[in-house]
Amino acid sequence: MSKKRRMFDIDLPEDEVETPAPTEPQRRGPMATAITETGEASRQRAEVEAAIRAENDALAHEFVRLKKLGLITDMVPVTDVRVRKLVRDRSQRQEPEIADLMASLRAVGLSNPIRVEQAADGGYELVEGWRRLTAFRALLAETGEDRWARIPASFVPHGETVEGLYRRMVDENLVRKDISWAEMARLARAYVEDGVGGCEDLDQAVNQLFASTNPQKRSYIRRFAYLLSRLEKQLEHPETIPRALGLSLAQRLEQEPGLVARIVQALQAAPKRSAEEEVAILQGFDRAEPVAISPRGNPGRGRPAKRGKTVLRLPLAAGEVKCTAAAGKVELQLDRDFSTVERGRLEAAIEAFFRELG
């Protein structure tokens, strides 16, 4: 059966269909345009303000983080820095060194800021940099220039323990290697007297303060502390006492308690002595008999004293040399095989040695 497609004839009307005319966009009035523009500007301003607040918050958090780490540096008035919280490990009699530091500051400025802890009253407690602060104050008093009225200072983390502040001060000077044995010993004694960190004896104080040093060096500090306990009130320049002399005198004072009175008498006989003269007086008691003291207080200018054996230890690049000098004999000991030295060089060295002695 076949399928047939049916075809239908549809008569469409011949009338044209009207196409609606395009409408023009409706115009906005001036007020509507202004409102739209104002809203857009407000939105943009809000976005900018939000970005600024976010940046400020980030900077504030970063500032707090750096402050907690002690990495913030600022210019602080030298008059606002107090030197009361910690006993200083520096001698207060260092006029030549302060003068040299002042000359350096005039020439090149300060390269290493001091370290302070901000106090609750708005002031500052010095932790590190006593000499730098002293030099700035001296320059301000001398010149009156505003550039010395403020000093660069970094802030230690707030709330650090006193023990931690002491360690900061000590370790800084140990690294710089310019702190004397007597200054270290004096600090250890003050640490005990103040009872910092519950410290009750000198051994504990030395172990806490100088934990970064080796045991032998801590032993030397203890010996100097003993020496100062016997003579500090009479010594005017303890920071100039060499290590070997201080250790030897400490040992003699333990063995001969009556020696203290003799040393005190010799020191009192030279009331206006220099650092060199004071060391010379002490060296006299490191021998069998002390050097004679003239009425003017100058060692070696009065009646010659009898001398026994002198023992010195000198740190050199090749190692520590032990020198023993006695009547008619000088002995030098060093961990070295001198038989390997060329004969001519050895003779020249001996000649130079005696030529220097005159």
Image (spheres, rainbow, N blue to C red):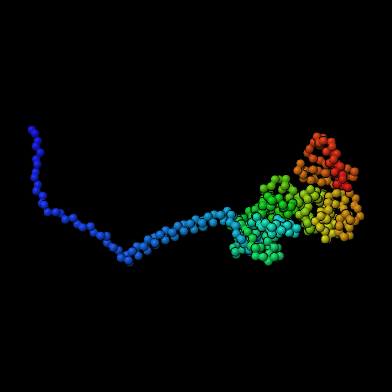
Give the residue at x 8% y 34%.
2
Q: Is residue 94 visible?
A: no
Q: Quadrant of residue 124?
A: bottom right
**Residue 74 spot, x, y in % from top left:** 60, 59
The residue sitting at the right extreme is 303
Q: Nearer the viewer, residue 336 or 208?
A: 336
How many numbered discs, if any?
0
**Residue 142 spot, x, y in % from top left:** 71, 65
Give the residue at x 21% y 58%.
21
**Residue 145 spot, x, y in % from top left:** 67, 65
Q: Quadrant of residue 355?
A: top right
Quadrant housing the N terminus: top left
251 on left or right of 13:
right
Q: Nearer the viewer, residue 342 or 340?
A: 342
Give the residue at x 66% y 63%.
148
Q: Quadrant of residue 85?
A: bottom right
**Residue 18 spot, x, y in % from top left:** 16, 56
Give the residue at x 79% y 40%.
334
312 on left or right of 61:
right
